[in-house]
Amino acid sequence: MTAREIVDLMNREDRKVALAVGKEIPAVARAVEAIVAGIRKGGRLIYVGAGSSGRMAVLDAAECHPTFGTPPTLVQALIAGGGRAITQAVEGAEDDVRRAEHELRTRKLTRNDVVVGVTASGTTPFVLAALKYARGRGATTVAITSNRKMPVARLAKIVIAAEVGPEVLTGSTRMKAGTAQKMVLNMLSTATMTRLGHVYENLMIDVVLTNAKVAKRALRILAEASGKSVSAAEHALRAARHNMRAALVMLKMGVTAPDAKSRLKEAGGELRVALRETQKN
């Protein structure tokens, strides 16, 4: 096959992924509801995976803190083989069931935590051991897999099985299966954080200002959300000591930074309540 024929074939196969994930929307929504409920009770979202699946999980977990301003420990990812496995294969890591149990034990798993096992094959020992341990601790278990008939489905309370079919490169689950995993993980974390109030409209109101590019994005977010100018947003953000929520309250309510922070405190941190756009839950 020519290069064009190869990529055309891959593209045709990739179109099947969104359709396969779409069939699992009810299960994804149930998982989001479970994660939100757990976090509101003080729990955490913990992904577990090996190989490509583990790397997808690590990526999604790592992006939650800077995107949504959540504590780094709120969304975690355990990958078989540890940090070294993020950039290279670690021989035998996915078979180390004792390590999976140890990792969760050291994190003092509780019944409010939600453990999401990510395994395309549905048979990865590291993931199965983690889900089994989580069940024993009373935590909610979720499986993201490509085969509903595999052992992982029997260990998870909620099963998300996007059956994408055979890979172009036989057995290489880093392809369609990996793309499906990325889509589902994005849905879980983004929908969860939206339900928890870390998003205003479709804007990242809690984005962490880690560099100049993000700082400029924050000003555009505040300007769009408030209908004010970028210069007004810059003034408010500076006065609020880079607290985007307080800055938005200042801009929309026409109040000072101390008053904005006081309103947010009275609202229990709920932005829409502080803005008087909704009632406190």
Image: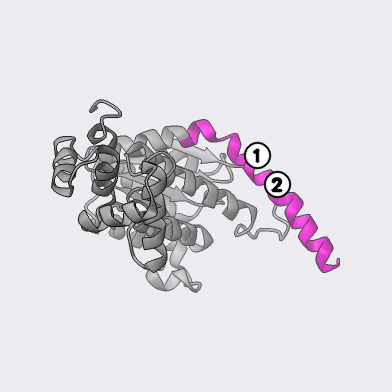
Q: Which mark is residue 15?
A: 2
Residue range corresponding to the magenta coloring: 2-28
Give me the residue at 43% from left, 32% from top: 30
Of 61 and 139, the residue lying toward us: 61
Is 12 left or right of 257, judged from the image as shown?
right
Residue furthest right in the image: 1
x%, y% of residue 128?
A: 43, 50
Amino acid under label 2?
Answer: Arg
Magenta stretch prevailing secondary structure:
helix
> Which residue is identified by label 1?
19
x%, y% of residue 179?
A: 59, 53
Q: Quadrant of the N terminus?
A: bottom right
> Which quadrant would residue 235 be assigned to in this image?
bottom left
Residue 113 visible at all: yes
Amino acid under label 1?
Answer: Leu
Is 164 left or right of 249, judged from the image as shown?
right
